[in-house]
Amino acid sequence: MAAVRKIINDPVYGFITIDEPLILQIISHPYYQRLRNIHQMAFAHLVYPGAVHSRLHHSLGAYHLMCNALSELKSKGIEISHDEELGAKIAILLHDAGHGPFSHTLEQELIPGVHHEQISFLIMQVLNAEFNGQLDTALAIFTNNHPKRFLHQLVSGQLDVDRMDYLNRDSFFTGVAEGVIGYDRIIKMLTVKDGELMVEEKGIYSIEKFLVSRRLMYWQVYLHKTVLGAEMMLVKIIRRAKELIRKGEGLHAASKVLDNMLKNPQDYQNMSDALQIFCRLDDHDVLATIKNWSWHPDKILRLLCRSLIDRHLYKVKLQAEPINLALTNQKVQEVAALLELNEEETAEYFVFTGEASNTTYNPADERINILFKDGTIKDISQVDNALIQHNLSSTVKKYYICYWRV
Amino acid sequence: MAAVRKIINDPVYGFITIDEPLILQIISHPYYQRLRNIHQMAFAHLVYPGAVHSRLHHSLGAYHLMCNALSELKSKGIEISHDEELGAKIAILLHDAGHGPFSHTLEQELIPGVHHEQISFLIMQVLNAEFNGQLDTALAIFTNNHPKRFLHQLVSGQLDVDRMDYLNRDSFFTGVAEGVIGYDRIIKMLTVKDGELMVEEKGIYSIEKFLVSRRLMYWQVYLHKTVLGAEMMLVKIIRRAKELIRKGEGLHAASKVLDNMLKNPQDYQNMSDALQIFCRLDDHDVLATIKNWSWHPDKILRLLCRSLIDRHLYKVKLQAEPINLALTNQKVQEVAALLELNEEETAEYFVFTGEASNTTYNPADERINILFKDGTIKDISQVDNALIQHNLSSTVKKYYICYWRV
Amino acid sequence: MAAVRKIINDPVYGFITIDEPLILQIISHPYYQRLRNIHQMAFAHLVYPGAVHSRLHHSLGAYHLMCNALSELKSKGIEISHDEELGAKIAILLHDAGHGPFSHTLEQELIPGVHHEQISFLIMQVLNAEFNGQLDTALAIFTNNHPKRFLHQLVSGQLDVDRMDYLNRDSFFTGVAEGVIGYDRIIKMLTVKDGELMVEEKGIYSIEKFLVSRRLMYWQVYLHKTVLGAEMMLVKIIRRAKELIRKGEGLHAASKVLDNMLKNPQDYQNMSDALQIFCRLDDHDVLATIKNWSWHPDKILRLLCRSLIDRHLYKVKLQAEPINLALTNQKVQEVAALLELNEEETAEYFVFTGEASNTTYNPADERINILFKDGTIKDISQVDNALIQHNLSSTVKKYYICYWRV
Amino acid sequence: MAAVRKIINDPVYGFITIDEPLILQIISHPYYQRLRNIHQMAFAHLVYPGAVHSRLHHSLGAYHLMCNALSELKSKGIEISHDEELGAKIAILLHDAGHGPFSHTLEQELIPGVHHEQISFLIMQVLNAEFNGQLDTALAIFTNNHPKRFLHQLVSGQLDVDRMDYLNRDSFFTGVAEGVIGYDRIIKMLTVKDGELMVEEKGIYSIEKFLVSRRLMYWQVYLHKTVLGAEMMLVKIIRRAKELIRKGEGLHAASKVLDNMLKNPQDYQNMSDALQIFCRLDDHDVLATIKNWSWHPDKILRLLCRSLIDRHLYKVKLQAEPINLALTNQKVQEVAALLELNEEETAEYFVFTGEASNTTYNPADERINILFKDGTIKDISQVDNALIQHNLSSTVKKYYICYWRV
């Protein structure tokens, strides 16, 4: 195949260069192009109007960081063959290909029991067949079956290029400048020892900042009360729609794809059969449907859809202690009276509680290893004068209540 | 009403502050929130994946620049009352409220004969009624009926904050760093003399850069061949759909709003009646519809919709001379044979020509006046050593051909 | 006096605006202009070539943040008179005016027993006399004798605009992007309760990032081994020069000012007399002198000066444990042999140890108070899920050895 | 030699990587380190306080762009050997090594008749001898004696990396954001045909912006009236000092190096002998000397030196027409009376005129060639719809008068 070379402008990194024909072919594939129509940050733009970047954009960014990381490691003498390089780049490019619209929110509503990573895996297999086995190495790396474990760690691990890109990109597009991480310095500090990804000693403070940025982004942005309120409203809309379908009431999604998914969930039990349909689903199906339903005769559905469109969201309270039951009951009564609904429906759709939790750094899960000049290796939580000790490695749980504004 | 103060993160300007209750109410209105779902740059993201910012984001940005410009002018002793300040801010906030989805492309397809500025005007009138006349000054400024002409010029003129924001924001989100303009310096150089907006002498080079950036953005970004190809494909889809409707063939848009608009165009003759429906229309209606139609039995419609979704766009050639007729005819024949269509349909939907033109600076249209220290005023094309002489003030026309890739 | 308005370009903040005649007069004063010739970061540019910004630039930046902070507090209804505003701006503008060249390094070498803040105070008094008492309020704020304590806290406290600017500016010019702090968000979160500066609850994560940035900048930049090595070399040069003067050997500084300061230290016991001379001293005196001395007959002085100029610096080791005495002794012997010096001189000038310590956040010293929505106040180390607990509030000490490269 | 790899933080480009032992050795050489103490923009920091970056920093930046440009060209299949690559990098690193302090101002005052490029050439020759001929290729490229002419054009030509870096870096550090150029896009558009450096068609608008930025930087920054006033004051100081030396009056520069240069200019007729001394001269010598002279008995010298230090600069007027002689005469009389000097001395040192000129793009000098897709080549001033026609390619001359503020 003739030499190809494509340069993509990226406000975050300047330019992203693609110079492998296979990469270009994958990017041009409809399964990849679909990601263009899926917001990376779902409803975060309701609070941060700039946060409308797509999953396609994020995965291109992660691909760019992968290129940089591989080139850096090679310049340090770590052996990586062209086939492995290509494999790692494809693995990261497709790592999120299995996401549906509003993924973290709807994943378990639309196709219960199937995780988006499984779908990414299925998509890679389909593409591998289409491209005559050229994705074999990518699949091995993605599933951690490739002998050079650090390649998988770059795709999925405590310090993978996925996290580096999304933290950086989400900070950039939200305008939360404090979330920006020193991705270029972290990448320059990466190294490999005994087949494992490590960080050079000089990179300790950059890693600390990375973990603190993640913590900040989690509590300040990803779990923003308004965003949480919108996501919960979407969940309730889909649950109400499924309830109406169960009851046999007339209800149609705006698009054939979403309509089928809601009405024939059994089709998706064996995801691989339904993949082709799933790979036509994006944000537009969901949002056009909600707009149509904002005129639906069912009061609950109509109310929820109209509210989400007009950005009249639930009031959300988030706190360190569990929500007081008395408060919940009081709100149920108030809202039930206001909306003229019974208490059961009110508690199901308009007043409810939940919890969220986050661990900044969990060394039990997967470690960030620091390689010292003298050859010793320590987990970052074990170095002298570490910021990451008790506090950042323990899980923090918060409780919330969502209720209709009275 | 109690004091309000809302801070919105913006990657372009850092923070946008809103501290007027009325401004907050307008922003919360469904007619404004609709702009959230309309891409500012239509299909530009097919080339520049970051260019997915919304018209809501742009108008907030223009509002921010208006705040800065007014504050700058006041600090120079120019009298602006609180009512005028509020009016100018509301006028810019709503100046684009009348845009529909893919506005520059579809404006004349969906509601022929109605310009988006008329709709913005209607929306302002509706809101003025809702808010008991509080938008009177905004309307006067918007329609250039307010005695302080410079306020209108800030909303709409050669150097208005609308252009400043969109050039800056579009450059930012596309990643075309060269389009970025020195908006803050231009604003610091603004002044008013005899009721007209002027630029201080020291700002000449900044204005030149602004005009050169606009030229660059026009030819390099807005008129990018791929973007043009996608826009033309969308036009052809809508035309084909209208043709099928005319023929009485079964065809439904995914959303009720768009369906009604395509099937009952006469409703929109008297725009004010139809305003409420129009103000529910956004990108999702169009894009969900195109997805549905990608399975439609009509071959032409199906082909166009499927191609737009999969990003298999027309091949576009852009040149200084008119397109050679022989080339067009040859392409028609090739494509007709390939697609097994007759030549008429091919020429209508798959091979066609057009032209685009741009004037960087048209002093005949509206001038950029430079105020010298000695009190004299010159048009920027008349100052010594001006960059803007013949070339930037003459219209440049380019010709293009779009055709199906064989 | 006529209206003045001066705009200064600043790569960090865009533009700095000055619109008070008195501020302009102070900035134009030779005592302030002197700061132009004093590097903010001394020898940091030996590692970070961009870090050549001046103390004048830093104090202008701090002034800019003070303007923003005061304007923010006023918009929240906190009463600040024009006189107080002017006072706070002047206080921050002059807070560092007492710094000499290579201040943190040479402060105790050139004028032992006098702290730079005392000199800043003296300078303010002199200017107050020159400007007929117009600096009374600035002096009261600077010395914490003004009743509104928060004004002093903005000049000097855990969250003062001095620190905010230098962390931000030093990060910017070194290119250590990770040190950049969200100064604008912190300023938007500032408030005042009971006369004390506080941070609104929503600002917690920004403050955490600020403290982590400070920690990173301290260990990674300010205490960089190469920078430490250069600073220690400068100290040794000045000590050697004073030693030679004591011995009566011929030695002249390049400049009269520095020459006088080295030879007649008693003049500076009563600082106010010597102020006029001190206020002519800057980096050029020190660096031109070192260049001249690089040809001096005294071997030690010549060697040290030549090495500093040519950037052949000490080798520095930094560690958590005290330096092993055996290592020191071994190095002394090696270097003494190499340089053909006796062991005493070697230990004095070419092989020596020291220690450095830093506390990221010392609540005992001065607290960062978080104001919650319900009106309660907590120190940031006491809030739920705080990052700042044991670790960041305990002092970290490191030990170092500097020795001549063998 | 063992593998080396050094990463330098740069606020402009992020990181600059050095991985050739020879490059590191050159950078460590005292002749290169000297550039650390020479301001790239001389007195521009009197207006733009951030503009204190050094010639060392600029040449590192130009080196970085050279690395990028070479890597880009190689990826396009242009053959460049490792030796040529190293040669081009060294040539750019040392292209400015011959600059003395305040070079554009003092070049002809300190060593009349010798151009800084000649000194750069001499320095390269000395280093070539030290490094055993390893700079042969660098010298061939620098002097345009290497057969691949495009390598020389990258070092010195209309589109060389020298200009790209200084425009970009000067814009960055002054904070004149509008001067920033799309250096990365220009580099990606570079190509080579018939051994000549060209720009791909798609790069036309980037080149236009580059030329317009240069024009803006020239008139707005480099020729800023205050900067011009300071530079002229420095020239007058040196001329007065030479005059006093000629008259045999007691006068000493603060540093031996500068003292020798002023008193024994004949030593520098044969530059190569004097090189070692010249290569010890930097800004500190000049500035420490001026400080000393601010107490000198000669009234003119003292007045000029004191004024430059205290930033009491000449008043400068810049205009398109020659300065009216009557104005000059009137100013001479006023100033002579005020300073109690005779009119001759006044006209020599305190009231005088001059002129400055600039051509944005001179195709006669050296062309910027655009390579079209069809293989044709056009000068940028010849393409359709070119911005660069008459105006940017004609020389603009301005006239100025400098006079002591009365």
Image (cartoon, coloured by chain):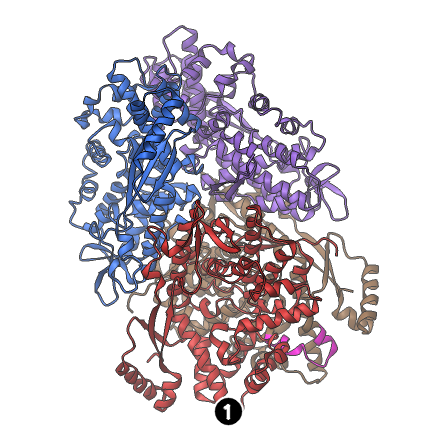
Chain colours: A red, B brown, C blue, D purple
Q: Identify which residue is drawn at 32% across, 80% down.
A: A406
Q: Residues within 10 Å of mark 1 (few under 14, many from 20)?
A: few
> Which image quadrant: the N terminus of chain D?
top right
Secondary structure of the residue carrying tag 1 is helix
**Closer-to-camera residue (D63/C300):** C300
Highlighted magenta segment, given as a residue range: B288-303
Q: Is residue D357 left or right of residue A403?
A: right
Image spot of residue B128 (x, y percent)? 42, 71
Image spot of residue A212 (x, y percent)? 38, 57
The residue that disc 1 covers is A246
Farthest residue to the top: give it.
D248
> Which image quadrant: the C terminus of chain D?
top left
The reply to whether residue D215 is visible in this rendering is: no
Image spot of residue D273 (x, y percent)? 54, 13
Quadrant hosting residue A365: bottom left
Say if C136 sits above or below B261 in the image: above
Quadrant hosting residue C135: top left
Which amino acid lies under the numbered mark 1 shown in the image of this protein?
Arg
Image spot of residue C202 (x, y percent)? 32, 62
Say if B382 sits above or below C340 in the image: below
Q: Is residue D153 left or right of residue C40?
A: right
The reply to whether residue B330 is visible in this rendering is: yes
Dominant secondary-structure state across the stretch colored magenta: helix
Quadrant hosting residue D243: top left
**Closer-to-camera residue (D341/A15):** A15
Q: Identify which residue is drawn at 23% across, 37% down.
A: C117
**Closer-to-camera residue (C236/B119):** C236
Q: Is residue C399 magenta?
A: no
The chain holding disc 1 is A
**Closer-to-camera residue (B228/C343):** C343
Q: Is residue A206 left or right of residue A2?
A: left
